[in-house]
Amino acid sequence: MLINYSESLRIAYREKKCLLDIIHSEETSEIKKNLFSEWVKRNLESPVPQLVECAKTYQHWTYEIKNSLEVPYSNGPIGGTNNKIKALKRVTFGMTNFENFKARIMLLN
């Protein structure tokens, strides 16, 4: 509903959706890389200043982003496990027996 009130918001929403479509498409990695490059070039000339800043950042990280489009791997699951362990560490502050702490970590999964 809000995108009906602001042209800048409408443009930003459309470009966000376009980028997500590129990331989640079933195309080959080469096509996805080309589409990503076109997206960056298009948004470097955008009338929305936030999109220009975003495109500059993506342009700086182009090599890494294109690599992520090429392989289907993510470090998200490991990051989630590390977050669970850190939360457990905070909750069990003062636990003196390391073996019990290790057993609690093993029960997380």
Image (cartoon, rainbow, N blue to C red):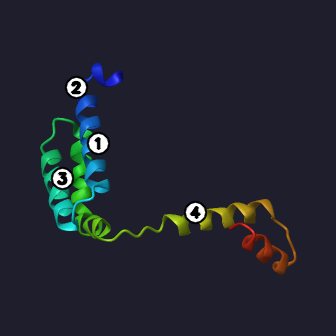
Disc 1 to disc 3, how far (Cα)? 14 Å
Q: Which residue is mark 1?
A: 17
- On-image quarter of the N terminus: top left
- SS at mark 4? helix
Against 38, residue 29 (above or below) is below
Local crowd at mark 4 within 10 Å, few (<14), some, or many (≥20)? few
Name the secondary structure under disc 2.
Answer: helix
Instruction: Give neighbour class at mark 3: few <14, some 14-19, many 20+ (Cα, 10 Å).
Output: many
Residue 51 percent across, percent down from the top left: 24, 43
How far is disc 1 from disc 2 in space, using C-alphas? 15 Å
The circle drawn on residue 40 is: 3
- The mark that comes first in sequence, 1 or 3, is 1
From the viewer's side, name the closer residue of 30 and 13.
30
Alpha-carbon span between mark 2 and mark 3: 20 Å
Q: Residue furthest right?
A: 96
The location of residue 78, given as percent across then percent down, is: 54, 69
Q: Write down the residue under mark 4.
A: 80
Give the label on residue 34, or none: none
- Secondary element under disc 1, as helix, strand or loop, is helix
Of mark 3 and mark 4, the one earlier in the sequence is 3
Kind of residue at badge 3: Val
Query: How much space separates mark 2 and mark 4, taking CA atoms?
Result: 37 Å
Q: Position of residue 80 (x, y in %)?
A: 58, 62
For the point 21% across and 59% down, which residue is it? 59
User: Which of marks 3 and 2 precedes in the sequence?
Assistant: 2
Please rate how many residues cluster around mark 2, counting C-alpha atoms within 10 Å: few if below 14, some from 14 to 19, many from 20.
few
Whether label 3 touches label 4, CB < 8 Å: no
Seen at 15% across and 40% down, the residue is 46
Instruction: Give me the C-alpha separation between circle 3 and circle 4.
Output: 30 Å
Q: Which residue is mark 2?
A: 7
Numbered disc in front, either 2 or 4: 4
